[in-house]
């Protein structure tokens, strides 16, 4: 207790105005970096408790604010298998962080340990990393003080992408077991992905050069490093890394990156887009991916998370068929309400695969995807992955092929399961998956874009007095409160063809979001504005 008290005094939490508290949200704690020192210290305390509760397995802590501006930062916890912190524990994080004094903090800490039957003398281990934000350096010091005060083994992996940290947590905990996920080092990550990429390509060639915009974030140096592990000539791999300047923090996520491309629906202005060149953007911590090109005739064309999801589902579905496993393995596609309606129709009617809709936030999608043998999940913003169950992995290895085609399908599936990050959405791993699929299908980005036509849509952010008044049901697609609002939205939607609209409170900002889609662009805009006026 004395050690925690003394260390906590060095890392005070900045009090909020009366009635407001810090909450562990979809992305952990995320805000202006200068508010985060005390919060990060307390998250360190929780990570040590979590490790002790989880039989001393390693817990991860990642310091990043993803696509947010450079002045922000954030801190989140990664569970032993590399997935996000169990939801129940988000409340414990909130309780620790909002304790009003150092003494109360120790009280909450000890009460949690007692209630959860945690042995505070058991070993604990926390592995951590951070993105390229300058504030990360001091936040790591706060975290290290908490680990020191609680006698926790600390492993500092320094600067990493978020998905690399998730990989390292799982690799650390599975090392030396039959479920070993990979060597628990940054090099181990590159080697695993490069080897799996080679097996998945099976001698095929990449279909043209690719420009990768790294949002001036951690993805830049990491992708440059990773490229050293890939034999470029062998696969015709011609990747140009742009926006990879991490020495000027102020340009992080500035007019570039996956979030810019998705929300502004245009290519980053720098470097000047070359018509026809295949391009993609990562976000500031390299867990989101958006593809696009500027068409000499029709202008900017974007291939977002829904496209990546349907591309993966289509390819993997065909492989499962060729592998003779269609009746054995259940494939499901998980989306949120923000998925374009045309993608949902394409997946259910053309690919004949079930689509499940969950609330926003990848933890919800991840959880539902785990219920399938092969669970494909992506948010429209480009964050997602494909999960393979132990049964699926076993089937890829154990099925006796009756033909060379069946063998090829089984081997390709096994390679994809190694190539695709199983812990969390990973832009670098997802990019390689997309490249493998396009190479197998011999598709250009235009071929990919031709699979279906997106319904015109519009997303608007609406300032409201109190966003907590907005309660939803049906995976956030309908409002329960304020009373009467949903009836008004329904009436507005009925005025348009092929239309859909919903409103919900943002989980990461103090505002509501309205999404609308309809048969034409002007109708989608009009509907979005009508709904915005209803909830304003
Ligand atoms: P909120 O602010 O709850 O809409 C946003 C994104 C989510 C998710 C989280 C976490 C949209 C519409 N919402 O959530 O998809 O990625 O941030 O980063 O893009
Ligand atoms: Zn991110």
Image (cartoon, rainbow, N blue to C red):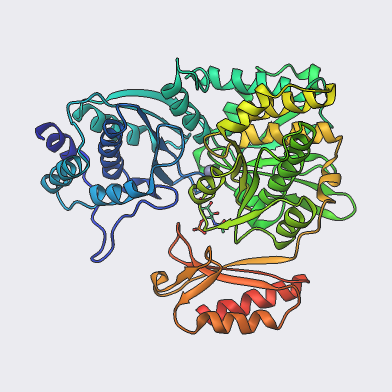
Q: Nearer the viewer, residue 142 or 182?
A: 182
The image shows residue 426, relative to residue 176, as above or below, that is below
Q: Is residue 199 left or right of residue 363?
A: right
Q: Nearer the viewer, residue 114 or 72?
A: 114
The x, y position of residue 368, in whole percent, is 53, 49
Where is residue 78, by image quadrant? Answer: top left
- Please count the marks in the image: 0
Q: Nearer the viewer, residue 452 or 81?
A: 81
The x, y position of residue 398, in whole percent, is 66, 22
Q: Is residue 271 visible?
A: no
The image shows residue 184, relative to residue 392, as above or below, that is above
Residue at 69% across, 60% down? 340
Residue at 44% across, 41% down? 84
Q: Is residue 69 left or right of residue 80?
A: right
Residue at 46% across, 28% down? 170
Extreme residue in the right direction: 297
Where is residue 4, by image quadrant? Answer: top left
The x, y position of residue 316, in whole percent, is 73, 38
Q: Nearer the viewer, residue 69 or 174?
A: 174
The x, y position of residue 376, in whole percent, is 63, 44
Q: Is residue 57 visible?
A: yes
Image quarter (top left, top right, bottom left or bottom right) of the N terminus:
top left
Where is residue 487, by image quadrant? Answer: bottom right
Q: Is residue 98 left or right of residue 79?
A: left
Q: Is residue 284 left or right of residue 268?
A: left
């Amino acid at each position: 207790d004395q050690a925690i008290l003394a260390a906590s005094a060095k890392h005070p939490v900045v009090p909020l105005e009366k009635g407001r508290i810090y909450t562990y949200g979809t992305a952990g704690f995320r805000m202006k970096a200068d508010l985060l020192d005390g919060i990060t210290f307390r998250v360190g305390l929780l990570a040590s408790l979590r490790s002790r509760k989880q039989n001393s397995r390693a817990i991860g802590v990642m310091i990043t604010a993803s696509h947010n501006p450079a002045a922000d930062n954030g801190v989140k916890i990664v569970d032993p298998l590399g997935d996000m912190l169990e939801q129940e524990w988000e409340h414990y994080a909130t309780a620790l962080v909002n304790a009003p004094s150092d003494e109360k903090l120790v009280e909450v800490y000890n009460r949690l340990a007692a209630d959860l039957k945690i042995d505070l003398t058991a070993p604990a281990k926390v592995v951590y990393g951070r993105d390229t934000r300058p504030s990360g350096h001091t936040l790591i010091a706060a975290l290290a003080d908490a680990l020191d005060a609680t006698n926790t083994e600390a492993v500092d992996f320094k600067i990493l992408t978020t998905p690399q940290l998730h990989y390292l947590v799982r690799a650390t905990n599975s090392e030396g077991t039959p479920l070993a996920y990979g060597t628990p080092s940054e090099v181990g990550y590159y080697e695993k992905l490069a080897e799996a990429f080679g097996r998945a390509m099976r001698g095929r060639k990449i279909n043209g050069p690719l420009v990768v915009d790294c949002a001036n974030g951690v993805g830049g140096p990491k992708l440059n490093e990773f490229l050293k592990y890939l034999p470029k000539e062998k696969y015709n791999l011609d990747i140009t890394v742009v926006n990879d300047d991490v020495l000027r923090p102020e340009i992080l996520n500035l007019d570039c990156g996956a979030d810019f491309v998705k929300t502004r629906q245009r290519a980053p202005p720098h470097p000047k887009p070359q018509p026809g060149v295949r391009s993609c953007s990562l976000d500031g911590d390299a867990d989101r991916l958006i593809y696009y090109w500027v068409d000499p005739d029709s202008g900017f064309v974007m291939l977002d998370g829904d496209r990546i999801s349907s591309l993966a589902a289509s390819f993997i579905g065909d492989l499962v068929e060729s592998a003779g496993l269609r009746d054995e393995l259940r494939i499901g596609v998980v989306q949120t309400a923000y998925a374009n309606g045309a993608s949902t129709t394409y997946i259910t009617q053309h690919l004949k695969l079930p689509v499940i809709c969950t609330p926003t936030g990848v933890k919800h999608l991840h959880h539902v995807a785990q219920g399938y043998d092969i669970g494909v999940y992506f948010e429209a913003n480009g964050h997602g992955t494909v999960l393979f169950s132990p049964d699926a992995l076993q089937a890829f290895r154990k099925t006796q092929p009756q033909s060379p085609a069946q063998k090829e399908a089984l081997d390709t599936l096994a390679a994809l399961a190694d190539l695709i990050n199983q812990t969390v959405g990973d832009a670098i791993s997802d990019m390689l998956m997309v490249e493998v699929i396009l190479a197998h299908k011999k598709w250009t980005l235009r071929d990919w874009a031709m699979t279906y036509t997106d319904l015109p849509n519009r997303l608007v952010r609406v300032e409201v007095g109190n966003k907590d008044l907005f309660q939803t049901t049906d995976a956030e697609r309908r409002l329960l409160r304020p009373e009467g609002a949903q009836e008004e939205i329904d009436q507005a939607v009925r005025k348009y063809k092929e239309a859909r609209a919903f409103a919900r409170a943002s989980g990461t900002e103090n505002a509501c979001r309205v999404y609308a889609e309809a048969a034409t662009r002007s109708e989608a805009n009009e509907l979005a504005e009508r709904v915005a006026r209803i909830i304003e």
